[in-house]
Amino acid sequence: MDVTFMLVGHETPALAMLIYLPASAPQLSMSKSTSVHFNVTEGYSSTQIRSNVSPNSKSSPEFVCGAGAAFANIVLTFPVNKAIFRQQIHGINLSSAVKQLQLEGIRNLYRGLGPPLLLKCTTLSLTFGLYDFYNKQIQRWSNESLPILPVKLIAATLAGTTEAILTPFERVQALLQDRHQQRKYTNTVQSFHQLKRFGLREYYRGLTPILIRNGPSNAVYFGLREPIRNILPNYESNFGNITSDFVSGAVLGAIISTMYYPLNVVKSVMQRKAGGEFTSFYKTFITVFNERNRSVKKLYYGVQANFMRSLISWGIINATYEILKKSFFQNDNYLVS
């Protein structure tokens, strides 16, 4: 089955618009557009079907699929994420964090949704899109002579490092979710404006732990995503394969999130203040460790809820990504990966 896609505005692939065109349809003439042709094999399998995009392709639906997966995930898991954030910065248990949210009321439950929604949609768009982009560029540079695994790891690390340019969104999200900052920082736009008086550097407070986290965690995810999925069975039904995609993403995401949890605790503490001295990552870590009675266990406050949140989040992300990819590539019941 032949399918053609037209990617419009490919100079900005993270915001590119994909238009599905049947292979038999006449080609549209558009400025700044690139058409990509795919041949899709009959039969559903998210691990067996491959597109024939060459290392020379300039655009990819990976950007759009990543953004769509992030949107679904954030809307569904935001309240849980907010409770976890409270545990991280205040060192309290889950029931205390839930009580805080209950006292603030349902009206404030989704307060601060803007930054993570913008951040995650853009971040996951870049995560999948740039990984695909760097992967093709490395293959092209090496004439496809390098082993697959090193290419994946390098591409994933580069994609994760590039994502750090979005640190200001995480920065604002931290301020909006901290109850001590609720009067000073009321919404996303106002918060960005308020930080402007502190200079550009203030937007990137907490950059070091983000850089330490993004590259390696991306490498683990893309390095193990396909092997874990291959362990799980392929089913004849779409529902069965979507379930396998959910499980593989859930397990991998939960493990990675737990590995880097203390790093995110320190990042949250670094980003809860605005203005004043810039404390180093190491100094902040020592301060947090001492404040929690030098207890490693207390550095993991909120890890149980975080594990469950990541299990659900990455299951949703992985499954939704595959569903969207199937929808973009063709209207029948097949996935392309």
Image (cartoon, rainbow, N blue to C red):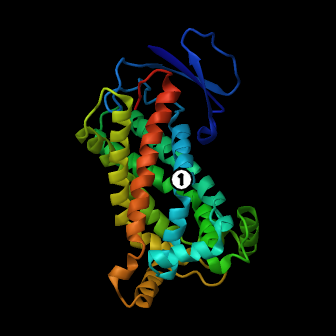
Q: Is residue 65 above or below residue 161?
A: above
What residue did someone put label 1 on? 76
Q: Is residue 15 left or right of residue 46?
A: right
Under circle 1, the secondary element is: helix
Q: Is residue 149 left or right of residue 122?
A: left
Q: Is residue 110 above or below residue 12?
A: below
Tell me where residue 259 sits by quadrant.
Answer: bottom left
Q: Is residue 30 above or below residue 241?
A: above
- Residue 13 in view here: yes
Tell me where residue 240 sits by quadrant.
Answer: top left
- Residue 142 in view here: no
The x and y percentages for residue 311 are: 39, 55
Q: Is residue 302 left or right of residue 58?
A: left
Q: What kind of residue is marked 1?
A: Leu
89 or 171: nearer the viewer: 89
82 or 120: nearer the viewer: 82
The x and y percentages for residue 76 are: 53, 53
187 or 130: nearer the viewer: 187
Name the residue located 73 percent from the left edge and 77 percent from the top edge: 184
Name the residue located 59 percent from the left edge and 18 percent from the top edge: 21
The x and y percentages for residue 59 are: 54, 32
Which quarter shows the C terminus?
top left
Most extreme residue toward the left, as rendered?
231
Name the residue located 37 percent from the left edge and 48 percent from the top edge: 249
Name the residue located 47 percent from the left edge and 41 percent from the top edge: 320
Count the numbered circles shown.
1
Tell me where residue 8 sits by quadrant.
Answer: top right
Which quarter shows the N terminus?
top left
